[in-house]
Amino acid sequence: MRLSDHFSLAELTHSATATRKGIQNVAPPAIIDTLILTADRMEKVRSLLGDKPIVVLSGYRSPAVNAAVGGSKTSAHMTGHAVDFLCPQFGTPAQVAAHLAKHLTGFDQIIEEFGDWVHVGFGPGKRGQTLTARKVGGKTVYTPGIKA
Ligand SMILES: [Zn+2]
């Protein structure tokens, strides 16, 4: 099922961890409605990044999948509002996050996570928060802003 021009339901519900651990990651109908809105926002992200391919690492996570990946208990992934992704043809995760922080509007969170991917959240809070996540002594530490 296609959610928007460039994003499918399969893509936004894929989880390597779920597949590996044999956990179901099926989005209920109400979440699919949210994923359609999220895909629409991701079209804007894609266009801001020069219409280069977006590689989705994680979109919707069922509570079981979220627990399996060690996600936050209040993760926006569980409501279908968040996407972790890469855009290698645009640049590094830090470059992608910095560009979006400057040009994207109406988002809740942009987090550059560990230099490995970008998390964007479109939850109803719309805080416009930008963060950088790093592991310090085995713990995840968030600092304000996007560090280059
Ligand atoms: Zn995320």
Image (cartoon, helix red, strand yellow):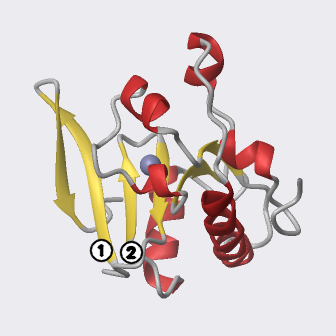
Return the residue found at the far front.
29
Front-lying residue, 33 or 147: 33
Residue 108 is labelled as: 2
Q: Amino acid at mark 2?
A: Asp
Q: Residue furthest left?
A: 137
Q: Residue at x 47, y 51 (%)?
A: 77
Q: Position of residue 88 (x, y in %)?
A: 67, 48
- Residue extending furthest top? 21
For the C terminus, the quadrant is: bottom left
Q: Is residue 75 left or right of residue 85?
A: left
Q: Which residue is mark 1?
A: 129
In the image, 93: left or right of 3? Answer: left
User: Mark 2 and mark 1 in contact (Cβ < 8 Å)?
Assistant: yes
Badge 1 density bin: few <14, some 14–19, many ≥20, Cα 10 Å:
some
Relative depth, front residue between 68 and 129: 68
Q: Residue at x 81, y 63 (%)?
A: 3
Q: Quadrant of residue 123?
A: bottom left
Q: Amino acid at mark 1?
A: Gln
Mark 1 vs mark 2, foreground winner is 2
Q: Position of residue 68 (x, y in %)?
A: 41, 23
Relative to residue 109, is residue 137 drawn left or right? left
Query: In the picture shown, does residue 50 fall above or below 12?
Result: below
Between residues 134 and 18, which one lies in front from this camera angle?
18
Q: Residues within 10 Å of mark 2 (few under 14, many from 20)?
A: some
Q: Is the CB of the residue bearing disc 2 within 8 angstroms of ligand 1?
A: no
| Rendered position, 73 above or below 37 | above
Reading the chain from its start, which is encountered first: label 1 or label 2? Answer: 2
Query: In percent of the image, x 79 and y 43: which residue is there?
Result: 10
